[in-house]
Amino acid sequence: KSYYYEDWLRDVDNPFFNGVSGIQHYTNWKITSPADCAVPYTYFDLMYVEDKDKIGDIWGNPDLEKFAQGWTDSWGRYPDATPETMDKNYQVYLCEMTSGALPTPWQPAAFMTAQSAVPEALRTTTFQVLSPVLGDVRFSHFAIQSLNNTSEFAAAAASRPDNCYGCAQGELVASPDA
């Protein structure tokens, strides 16, 4: 079947990851604001695991490795990447939620990157990057602020905490809650 990427995320990727043992909740997000060197991604995913000490078991799952290679073959910027060079196509960080709750499904959000802890705020979930799983860590903290609608993004970006050096608008593409 021929897929557009977002259809593939909803039909294939999201159900696969939400079915992997040890993964508690997995969502896919699309960056909808103009590219920013601090947030150079077009998509990002949030994966909540049951036990952060077992991330090696989850990421080392042979079915997951095969799935990741299939993603690379079909969608990767560098389809010839090997497991050792997969970080050319994507990065994976082990993070810990430091405040807030799961971002509200189906609402747009402001995704903010920082090199120090992001202050707690209303409708904002903050995270700390604990370690890289794949690739180099590009920020040590980040926050996701739920917005009521896309018109709130400019104000959220302008009023982001002083230590947040990047801000991008994200919209949920796929979630098990849909």
Image (cartoon, helix red, strand yellow):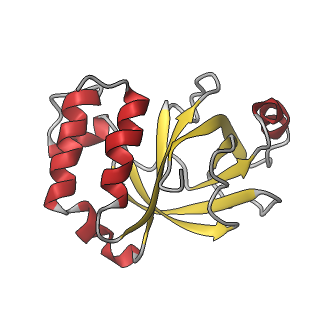
Q: Is residue 134 above or below residue 128?
A: above
Q: Is residue 101 above or below residue 160?
A: below
Residue 173 x, y percent position in the rendering: 52, 39
Residue at the image point whose x is 25% and y is 37% from the top: 71
Which sits in the foreground, 103 or 115? 103
Question: Horizontally, is 17 left or right of 70 in the view?
Answer: right
Can residue 118 be seen from the camera position used here? no
Residue at the image point whose x is 41% and y is 75% from the top: 50
Which sits in the foreground, 9 or 157? 9
* Image quadrant in which the N terminus is located: top left
Question: Horizontally, is 17 left or right of 64 in the view?
Answer: right
Kindly indicate the quadrant of the structure image that contains residue 68: top left
Question: Horizontally, is 167 left or right of 55 in the view?
Answer: right
Which sits in the foreground, 9 or 120? 9
Question: Horizontally, is 101 left or right of 76 in the view?
Answer: right
Residue 67 x, y percent position in the rendering: 21, 47
